[in-house]
Amino acid sequence: MYYLRNYSKWCAIHIKTFSTLALVVSAALLAGCNDTDYVQPTEVKIATYNLSFDRDTFEELIAEMQIAPAKQKALVTAYLDGTIDNDNDKRTAEKVIQIRNVAAVIQKNRPNVLMMAEYNNDGTGEDKAALIGFQDNYLSIAQSIDGAGGEVNLEPITFPHLESYSTNTGLASGLDLDNNGTIGGLGDDWGFGQYHGQYAFALMSQYEIDTDNTRTFQTFKWKDLEGAQIPTITICDDPTKFPTGMNCGDEWYSAEEWKQVRLSSKNHVDAPIIIPTANGEEVIHLLMSHPTPPVFDTGKNKAQNAAEVKFWNQYIQGKSFFYDDAGLNGGLADNAKFVIMGDQNLDPIAGDGISDVMQILHRDPLVNQDVMNGELYPTSYGASEHAVDKSLTHPKPNRISSTFGLGVDYAIPSANLNVVDTGVYWSASYEEGRILFNDARISDDGADGDGKSVSSDHRMVWIKTQF
């Protein structure tokens, strides 16, 4: 944002000296000459990105983020030239390469606000060491559009505001949620995770995050969502997958369990950010979540994924039944500006999930229809090319945001946000930055490598809004 001082004086002098033709052409341009100041609109780029930083322990991620840039360079150089001979160093170099490529994606796109899925934490979100290390040792260090090991040609980026959020992943429920007859183990956690904090999510922002008014819904009960019903066994093609004594159509939870089951596999978070503009402060509510994938079981996950997406559709409508972890009741306030963000694990027109749920959210009049059903829907050439390369059958291949062929990552703006541009960052083979997605030197699967070993199996999705 900038101000052009003495704008009225400039206008008066130049109107006198313009030719007749120039006066005609300039009439519209100089319509604001009675103003004392000219203010450039504020543009805010908001992005969501599943980084695939799902390490075996939180401590492992912290250690990777603490590696100094000089040590990173030495590891990457040795890895790429084949001189690395220690298995531990090799594994560390592979992680460093992934992190540096992810940092390059962020530096290239330069979002002002970034929600990051699969960013492990301590379970509570209080320990921000991994976030601080990512900022200090990767984002604050110039990376390369030509991939880790390439010539430095990107500008560092700084996010002064960092937040990590508590998660249900790896958090013991004390119930036999997987119906295997025993209590304890991965299947009995509120959300799937090898430990409390795996697959959590975090937020980086160049604008103030209003932590005092942030709402979390980690403990919100599934039963309290409007229209909620106990999920049943609906995928019945292989009865050997049923828990002992259960049959197709049986309710997954007992009545007592249903009273306690949490909705969110990670968390649902409403984090307002405060944006200074020429007309005062603007507040955007970042509605962040990462629902469970609608697969891997006999139907419970499919139902939970749909319910986690429905949560936001009902929340933006201001439904009164909501309660957050602090005990505050009610949904989002009328006319509030918002962006629904995260890897929702649900494609509106393809995949194994209940696509109708996402279609309903896309069509909600509270959501920006130019973005979700119009010409501003986020797309990329890289997605289209990937669909051809992998012989995918997605009806709208340019909307894919993952290597597994579905559009599951979202930044869904409210109808009252003036969105001027959107995109999915996925370079095609003929575009700059392709090596950040496909690098046969690094990948586990040769020339076709385009997954977590290079950067992520998801792509950054972004919107740009103007005030």
Image (cartoon, grey):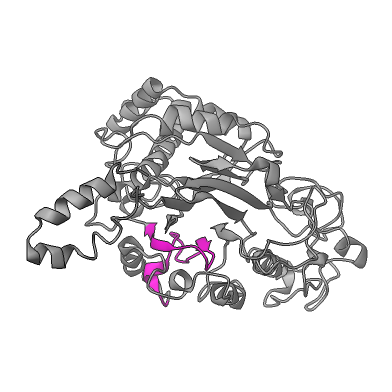
Where residue 198 appears, as percent x and y from the top left, is 64, 43
Q: Is residue 370 above or below residue 464?
A: below
| Residue 135 in sight from this viewpoint | yes
The answer to which of 451 and 246 lies nearer the viewer is 451
Circle count = 0
Residue 436 percent across, percent down from the top left: 34, 46
Q: Position of residue 224 (x, y in %)?
A: 82, 66
Is 292 displayed left or right of 53 in the figure?
right
The answer to which of 142 and 257 lies nearer the viewer is 142
**Residue at horizontal 43%, vertical 62%?**
419
Residue 188: say if magenta.
no
Tell me the residue at 45%/45% (across/down).
112
Bounds of the magenta segment? 395-424
Name the residue rendered at 49%, 32% in the picture. 134
Look at the picture and state if 170 lies above or below 151.
Answer: below
- Give left or right: position of 443 versus 18: right
Name the side, left or right, on which 105 lies relative to 221.
left
**Front-lying residue, 160 or 181:** 160
Indicate whether residue 416 is drawn in magenta. Answer: yes
What residue occupies the far right of the structure in this picture?
256
**Quadrant of the drawing holding the C terminus:** bottom left
Q: Is 173 situated above or below 314?
A: above
Eyeballing the image, is 208 above or below 31? above
Whether residue 166 is visible, yes or no, is no
Q: Position of residue 328 (x, y in %)?
A: 80, 53
Quadrant location of residue 29? bottom left
Q: Residue at x 86, y 64 (%)?
A: 258
Locate the N terminus by quadrant: top left
Q: Nearer the viewer, residue 372 or 39?
A: 39
